């Protein structure tokens, strides 16, 4: 009887994954929190200036403009921080399977070994992204409570009766679409990292040529499917319907997972 | 049943560790695997367990090739490595997570073995001494109750008392249906628990016999014999120890060290014997 996938074993694999990397995960969650606070309290930041300012001083017009335009170096960059967790965690996980004999011989199938780090990093990213989103929403609310009224009045006095508030402004949490975009990119990165690590561990020339051909093919199809403009504000229709795009992304994911599974199957320690 | 058919293996193309080695382990029992340093004992165990695949030949466990890496086959096998391999979990967590992957894993027995070894199941792995960590791994390996258990130098790092406890556990709790192979350099630590002997030399398996059959074939004594043919002689504390033929099937105490030295010193010793493994 060939048993290639079993949800109970997958659950055990996920428990192993959690207990192996929970400290890294907690550290990353704490790091995100600290960076979120520091990102709003560094010297010359709006909050810092507000705390340091004499209470009699009012908001400057420059600060008001800054508040309605995009955030500088805070949450947009913070969203990519969890990516720093994904790569070492996947590296350690694969290294464990490829170097520790008793782990390599555990009754977990190649599919289960493939799905565990993907699902594990998926859940970790989901939790970290939720943390960032909640922090961002809370901090945006604080900015609104403290600065919104004063900033609007100041802008009105300077002729800006209906000022344009950027979606990435201090008063708004970062749009969910940006999270989705970053999340999908990090998942793709984790799959590519896994394929790369597994290939490097046991270089098989033909396999490597196959992977390069596949990446080249993906790149060409991506080029064909995407439309480039010189201005990111211009919405352009892409080739093909959104359904084709989604099927294509799913196809890439399946190819990626299948490649990893095949590489795991050949594993020897 | 474990069958290895003409297996060859090398970590590099030029340097072969094992060459056309064949092995047939049909009967359950406790096997001692001996060999010089670098003879390929660990490699052989890894090949039998399915952690390595032979360059040539095949290894079958219950008629399934190890290269297929079937889950059902891996549930039948446990490999205890020489070096510590467990993650930094408590023994309790180790049993709760990895134990569930083995259908016959017995958590109560696992805790009982830990109790015999005097290891706390709630202490994290890194807080234990090296010897205690080894005990946790041994307890886990025994509690899996897999039909095929491979142990590579299991007593390394254990103190004298723990080695004694290990021997006691092996002789008491390895069931009659299980096949255990212990690879070791410490002959004296296992000579009372094993019932079969495997010797690897010059990239091949040169001996695969039960201790009973070896006793029927050879006579070990420090008293000079007249009727039996002297095969090998070695100096010992109590005079010269001799390895003789045993045509009259006389009883003697097996001296594994003498047998191993004889095989190593005279590679042709076994070639005229019916038990020479490569003739099979």
Image (cartoon, rainbow, N blue to C red):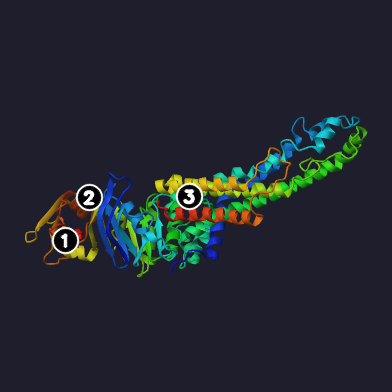
Q: Are marks 3 and 1 in contact (CB under 8 Å)?
A: no
- Could you tell me residue A251's position as x and y percent? 56, 56
Q: Which numbered disc flags the more N-terminal residue, 1 or 2? A: 2
Q: In the image, which is nearer the foreground, mark 1 or mark 2?
A: 2
Chain under label 3?
A: A
For label 3, the crowd category at 10 Å Cα-Cα, with few meaning under 14, some 14 to 19 and many 20 or more, is: some
Find numbered disc 3 in the image and state the secondary structure of the residue it sits on. helix
Crowding near pointer 2: few (<14 within 10 Å), some, many (20+)? some
**Quick one: A200 or B74, which is closer to the camera?**
A200
Query: Which residue is label 2 attached to?
Result: B202
The picture quadrant where one finds residue A161 is top right
Work out which quarter of the rendered image holds the C terminus of chain B and state it: bottom left
Please provide percent x and percent y for residue B106: 48, 66
- Label 1: which secondary element: strand
For the residues labelled 2 and 3, the Cα–Cα distance comes to: 32 Å
- Label drawn at residue B218: 1
Circles 2, 3 touching at the beta carbon (< 8 Å):
no
Is residue A127 among the parts visible in the rendering? yes
Tell which subunit mark 2 falls on: B
The label on residue A96 is 3
Q: Is residue A50 visible?
A: no
**B146 to A126, vertically: above or below:** below
Question: Residue placed farthest to the right in the image?
Answer: A157
Residue at screen point 53% across, 60% down: B97
Choose between B143 and A42: the one closer to the eye.
Answer: A42
Q: CA distance from mark 1 to mark 2?
A: 22 Å
């Amino acid at each position: 009887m060939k048993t290639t996938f079993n949800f109970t074993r997958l659950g055990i694999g996920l428990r192993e994954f959690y207990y192996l990397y929970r400290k890294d995960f907690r550290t990353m969650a704490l790091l995100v929190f600290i960076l979120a606070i520091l990102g709003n309290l560094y010297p010359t930041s709006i909050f810092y200036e507000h705390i340091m300012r004499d209470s009699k001083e009012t908001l400057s017009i420059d600060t008001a403009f800054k508040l309605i335009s995009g955030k500088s170096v805070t949450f947009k960059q913070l969203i990519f921080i969890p990516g720093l967790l994904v790569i070492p965690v996947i590296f350690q996980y694969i290294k464990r399977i490829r170097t520790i004999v008793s782990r390599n011989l555990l009754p977990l199938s190649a599919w289960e070994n493939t799905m565990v780090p993907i699902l594990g990093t998926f859940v970790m990213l989901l939790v970290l992204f939720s943390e960032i989103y909640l922090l961002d929403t809370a901090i945006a609310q604080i900015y609104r409570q403290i600065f919104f009224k004063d900033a609007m009045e100041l802008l009105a006095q300077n002729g800006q009766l209906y000022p344009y508030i950027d979606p990435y402004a201090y008063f708004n949490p970062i749009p969910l679409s940006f999270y989705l975009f970053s999340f999908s990119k990090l998942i793709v990165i984790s799959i590519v990292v896994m394929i790369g690590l597994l290939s490097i561990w046991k270089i098989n020339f033909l396999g490597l040529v196959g992977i390069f051909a596949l990446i080249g093919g993906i790149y060409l199809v991506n080029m064909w499917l995407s439309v480039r403009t010189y201005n990111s504000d211009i919405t352009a229709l892409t080739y093909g319907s959104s359904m084709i795009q989604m099927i294509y992304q799913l196809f890439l994911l399946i190819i990626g997972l299948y490649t990893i599974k095949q590489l795991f199957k050949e594993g020897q320690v | 049943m474990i069958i290895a058919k003409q297996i060859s293996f090398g970590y590099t193309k030029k340097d072969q560790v094992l060459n056309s080695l064949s092995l047939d382990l049909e009967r359950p029992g406790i096997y001692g695997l001996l060999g010089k340093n670098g003879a390929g004992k660990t490699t052989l165990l890894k090949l039998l367990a399915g952690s390595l695949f032979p360059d040539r030949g095949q290894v079958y466990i219950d008629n399934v090739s190890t290269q297929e890496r079937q889950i059902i086959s891996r549930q039948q096998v446990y490999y205890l490595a020489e070096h510590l391999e467990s993650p930094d979990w408590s023994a309790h967590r180790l049993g709760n997570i990895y134990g569930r992957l083995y259908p016959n894993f017995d958590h109560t027995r696992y805790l009982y073995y830990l109790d015999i070894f005097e290891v706390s199941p709630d202490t994290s792995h890194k807080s234990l001494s090296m010897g205690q960590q080894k005990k946790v791994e041994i307890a886990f390996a025994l509690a899996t109750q897999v039909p095929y258990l491979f142990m590579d130098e299991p007593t390394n790092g254990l103190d004298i008392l723990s080695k004694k406890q290990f021997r006691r556990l092996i002789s008491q709790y390895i069931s009659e249906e299980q096949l255990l192979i212990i690879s070791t350099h410490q002959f004296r630590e296992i000579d009372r628990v094993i019932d079969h002997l495997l010797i690897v030399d010059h990239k091949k398996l040169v001996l695969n016999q039960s201790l009973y059959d070896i006793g029927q074939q050879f006579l070990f004594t420090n008293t000079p014999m007249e009727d039996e043919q002297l095969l090998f002689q070695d100096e010992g504390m109590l005079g010269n120890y001799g390895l003789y033929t045993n045509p009259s099937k006389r009883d003697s105490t097996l001296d594994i060290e003498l047998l191993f030295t004889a095989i190593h010193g005279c590679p042709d010793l076994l070639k005229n014997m019916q038990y020479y493994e490569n003739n099979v």
